[in-house]
Image (cartoon, rainbow, N blue to C red):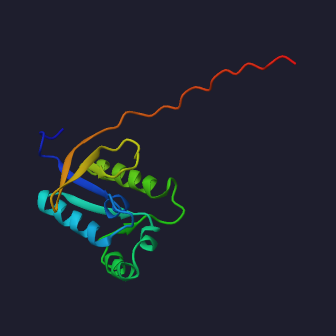
């Protein structure tokens, strides 16, 4: 195992989370600003921006055209249609593959991604700040079904 702080950091950004963070509608400009700040904060990290294909249609007409450039240049990757678990399942697969290749994956999202270390994000003025130490959420276990007694007729 690598010394703490020397792991190859792999940050998976849920595009939908950052584009819509504290906004009534999604913003490609906001996503770009957040990813730019992340690149400045963690220049040695490998960063993958993954979104749900519906994000494109949540953007304004102008940004919908702009996102085409991001798609063509692979700055953003949309989860394939019909993938198991939707874009969150796809993020989970990316995390597994990154870990298998010796990376230390951290996911920036507001979704529950199984077995993923979750980073946190906040804004400090106009700047985005990322906590990339990551925490693993506790497993959520479904409560057992309550025993319901039948009423006597």
The answer to whether residue 104 is seen in the rendering is no
What residue do we see at 30% from left, 48% from top? Answer: 99
What residue do we see at 28% from left, 66% from top? Answer: 31
Q: Position of residue 33 (x, y in %)?
A: 21, 67
**Relative horizontal placement of residue 19, taking residue 8 as reference (left or right):** right
What residue do we see at 34% from left, 44% from top? Answer: 116
**Relative horizontal placement of residue 7, taking residue 29 as reference (left or right):** left
Q: Position of residue 63 (x, y in %)?
A: 35, 78
Q: Nearer the viewer, residue 100 or 63?
A: 63
Give the image quarter of residue 82. bottom right
Give the image quarter of residue 50. bottom left
Q: Position of residue 67 (x, y in %)?
A: 35, 77
Q: How many marks?
A: 0
**Relative horizontal placement of residue 73, taking residue 25 as reference (left or right):** left
**Relative horizontal placement of residue 131, taking residue 26 as reference (left or right):** left
What residue do we see at 43% from left, 54% from top? Answer: 88
């Amino acid at each position: 195992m690598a010394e703490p702080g020397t792991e190859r950091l792999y940050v998976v950004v849920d595009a939908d989370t950052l584009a819509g963070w504290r906004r009534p509608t999604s913003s490609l400009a906001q996503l770009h600003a957040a990813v730019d700040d992340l690149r400045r904060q963690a220049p040695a990290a490998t960063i993958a921006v993954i979104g749900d294909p519906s994000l494109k249609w949540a953007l304004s007409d102008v940004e919908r055209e702009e996102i085409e450039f991001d798609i063509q240049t692979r700055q953003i990757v949309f989860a394939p249609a019909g993938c198991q678990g939707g874009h969150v399942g796809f993020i989970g697969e990316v995390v597994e593959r990154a870990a298998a290749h010796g990376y230390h994956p951290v996911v920036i999202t507001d979704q529950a991604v199984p077995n993923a270390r979750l980073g946190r994000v906040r804004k400090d003025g106009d700047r985005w700040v990322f906590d990339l130490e990551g925490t693993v959420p506790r497993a959520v276990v479904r409560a057992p079904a309550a025993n319901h007694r039948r009423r006597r007729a």
